[in-house]
Every structure is written in structure tokens, then in C-alpha cells.
């Protein structure tokens, strides 16, 4: 059996398919219940009840929403490019799923434990812009196209500072492998403080988190779907399951960015303290708990801050985050050189 699964081509294909299924099914369930969690958290912050009718405590609401979307008719505008119009949501959703191939949920638990995991993630997240631009252009609507242009400019602007943040972390690790990044945070400072990168690179941690909000088009950076100006942005012409794929892609990207934040700055699957009873809990549970912690901040920010103006959004990205991340990168490199802390020295 071992020989079949690990040393034959068909066995490797079957094993990879099973691994992908084992990751994607819980991920899709998490996406469904993230929409429920968001509505419940926002309701609590606004002193409302939230979903509470479909099922116990409204727990079947995501399934009701999915059924409603599947029952609706997909309307394609007469003047649109039919092929590109239908391809755009599928591209956005597929890229959100593909990125998870390199995410290690526990030590050794990654579908593809490649040495350039960070580059792969950065490439996949950059390709996400294409789905949005294609959707805006193929809709043959000025509102949709304006929303797509806003979104593309926003995502490119914040990817630059995110790139410098990633390089700051990589300097401290000496590897592009995501598993190595987590292992580099495994030791303790002064015998009890976890050596997570969110402490020495705290400004970069904040810059990265705010950039992930902009990267996923979440409040207060949800300019592409500004209802008051451009009527729901780039997917204004979409309905039914084509709209649902954009919706699923956005929430899957939120979970992905939370996972990246967890791996880069919060020690991945490592417990906060390497002592009992913390070590009794499996690493994958710690990983999920940390993702939920970061996702709560996504929802908290949405309930707290008003939407930025477009000029404020661009100024923050280019005039604040870019110089700050570049400066911290230089400071990090200088400190590692001066004190002999280079990881592979």
C-alpha cells in the first residue's frame, strides 16, 4: 500500500487529490460559517440579534443562503463578453483555493511543502487582481469598470508594502519555506516569552494586518464596492451563483490572509507557551484558534471604522506604509548584521 501511494504516479495523484479534499471541504465550511460569524459579531456590536431563525441559534443560515443563491437565475447582460463574464468569478474563487496548497496547518501538514512557499503565495494573491479587472471589463458597465479600476489600484498599492514586510520576516528566518518560518519562532526569550515575530517586528505586524484589509477589499478599505458612489462595484452586474463565487472568494481570501498573518507573526501551529497543558492541544487546533483571533479583528474593524476616501486610501499606502516598511526593512537588516543575528551565518 505504501509503495502504491508514494512511489507510483497514479497513487501520488490519488493521495494529492485526497489531501486537497481534506483541506478544501473544511475550508469551504469555514467560509460558510465565517459569513454567519460576521453577522453575529456585527449584531452583538450593534445590539441586535443577528441570524436566529433558520436552525438552532440561526446555525443553518449559511445553508439557506447557499440554497437561495443556487435557486436564482444567472442574468448575463446583453452587451457583455459572455465567456469572460462567467470566467471572472471562477478565476477569483479558484485562486483563493489554490493558495492553500502551500499553507502548513501543522508541522508536515502541507499539500506542497515547497521551498518558495512565500513567492507562490505572493504570485497567487497578485493574480487575484485579474479576476476583478476581467469582471469589471466584461460586464460592459461604467460602474463595474470603475469599481474594477479602483480595486486593481488598491490591491497593487498595498502589495508593495506587504512585499517589504515579507522580506523583513524572511531576513529573520533565512528561508522562503513557510514551515521554516514557523519553526524559526519555536524558541523562547528569557525562558517564558514566545519568540513570535509579532514582538520584534511589531510595526510590520500592524502594517501587514492593515494591508491585508486593503488587499481583501474589506472595511474601511471597501472602496471598490462603495454603495453610495458606484453601486456595489465590480460585481454590480452579477447575480446568483456567479455573485456567490465572488462572495466565497472574498471570504476565503480573508481566511488565507489570517493564516498568513498567523504563520508570519503569530507562530503558526505553535502553542503560546511550550509547557503543559498547552502542549497537550494539537498544533492544528492552535492554528485554527489563531486564525479565528485574526478574523475577529477583521470583523471588529468593519464595525468600528468608517470607509476611507479614495485619496486617503492611496496616501496611506504610498506615503505612509511604503516608506515605513522600507525603513523597517533597512533597520532589521542593519540590526541582524550589527549583532551577528543572521540566521544562516
Image (spheres, helix red, strand yellow):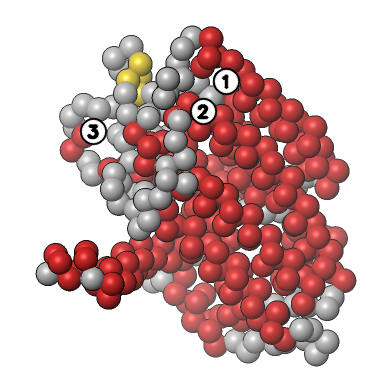
- Residue at 46% x, 12% y is 340
Disc 1 vs disc 2: Cβ atoms closer than 8 Å?
Answer: yes
Out of 213 and 128, give the one closest to the viewer: 128
Out of 71 and 200, give the one closest to the viewer: 200
Q: Which residue is mark 1?
A: 333
Report x, y in % for residue 30: 42, 60
Label 1: how many Cα within 10 Å (few below 14, some 14–19, many 20+) = some
Furthest residue toward top: 339
- Residue at 35% x, 58% y is 111
Which callout, 2 or 3, points to the residue nearer the camera? Answer: 2
Q: Name the N-terminal-most of marks 1 and 3.
A: 3
Whether residue 1 can be seen here: yes
Q: Which residue is mark 3?
A: 278
Label 2: how many Cα within 10 Å (few below 14, some 14–19, many 20+) = some
How far separated are the C-alphas under marks 1 and 3? 33 Å
- Residue at 43% x, 66% y is 28
In this rendering, the answer to whether 291 lies above or below 22 is: above
Find numbered disc 1 in the image and state the secondary structure of the residue it sits on. helix
Disc 1 vs disc 3: Cβ atoms closer than 8 Å?
Answer: no
Q: Name the N-terminal-most of marks 2 and 3.
A: 2
Q: Is residue 102 left or right of residue 82?
A: left
Toward which corner of the image does residue 177 lie, by quadrant?
A: top left
Q: Which residue is mark 2?
A: 171
How far separated are the C-alphas under marks 1 and 2? 7 Å
Out of 50 and 85, give the one closest to the viewer: 85
- Residue at 55% x, 25% y is 202
How far separated are the C-alphas under marks 2 and 3? 29 Å
Q: Is residue 135 left or right of residue 248?
A: right
Find numbered disc 3 in the image and state the secondary structure of the residue it sits on. helix
Amino acid at each position: 500500500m505504501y509503495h502504491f501511494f508514494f512511489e507510483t504516479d497514479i497513487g501520488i495523484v490519488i493521495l494529492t487529490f485526497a489531501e486537497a479534499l481534506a483541506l478544501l471541504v473544511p475550508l469551504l465550511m469555514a467560509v460558510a460559517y465565517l459569513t454567519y460569524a460576521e453577522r453575529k459579531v456585527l449584531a452583538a456590536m450593534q445590539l441586535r440579534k443577528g441570524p436566529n431563525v433558520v436552525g438552532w441559534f440561526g446555525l443553518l443560515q449559511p445553508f439557506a443562503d447557499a440554497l437561495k443563491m443556487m435557486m436564482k437565475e444567472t442574468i448575463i447582460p446583453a452587451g457583455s463578453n459572455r465567456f469572460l463574464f462567467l470566467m471572472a468569478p471562477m478565476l477569483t474563487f479558484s485562486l483563493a483555493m489554490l493558495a492553500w496548497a502551500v499553507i502548513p496547518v501543522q508541522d508536515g501538514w502541507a499539500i506542497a511543502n515547497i521551498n518558495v512557499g512565500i513567492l507562490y503565495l505572493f504570485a497567487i494573491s497578485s493574480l487575484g487582481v485579474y479576476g476583478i479587472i476581467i469582471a469589471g471589463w466584461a460586464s460592459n458597465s461604467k460602474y463595474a469598470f470603475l469599481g474594477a479600476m479602483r480595486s486593481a489600484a488598491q490591491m497593487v498599492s498595498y502589495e508593495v508594502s506587504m512585499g517589504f514586510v515579507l522580506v523583513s520576516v524572511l531576513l529573520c528566518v533565512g528561508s522562503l519555506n513557510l514551515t521554516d518560518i514557523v519553526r524559526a519562532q519555536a524558541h523562547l526569550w528569557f525562558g517564558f516569552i514566545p519568540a513570535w515575530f509579532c514582538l520584534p517586528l511589531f510595526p510590520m505586524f500592524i502594517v501587514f494586518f492593515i494591508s491585508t484589509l486593503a488587499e481583501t477589499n474589506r472595511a474601511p478599505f471597501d472602496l471598490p464596492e462603495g454603495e453610495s458612489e458606484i453601486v456595489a462595484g465590480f460585481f454590480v452586474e452579477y447575480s446568483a451563483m456567479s455573485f456567490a463565487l465572488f462572495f466565497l472568494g472574498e471570504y476565503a481570501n480573508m481566511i488565507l490572509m489570517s493564516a498568513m498573518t498567523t504563520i508570519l507573526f503569530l507562530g503558526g501551529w505553535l502553542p503560546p507557551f511550550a509547557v503543559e497543558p498547552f502542549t497537550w492541544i494539537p498544533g492544528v487546533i492552535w492554528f485554527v484558534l489563531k486564525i479565528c483571533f485574526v478574523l475577529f479583528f477583521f470583523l471588529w474593524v468593519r464595525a468600528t471604522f468608517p470607509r476611507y476616501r479614495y485619496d486617503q486610501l492611496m496616501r496611506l499606502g504610498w506615503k505612509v506604509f511604503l516608506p515605513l516598511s522600507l525603513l523597517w526593512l533597512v533597520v532589521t537588516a542593519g540590526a541582524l548584521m550589527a549583532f551577528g543575528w543572521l540566521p544562516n551565518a
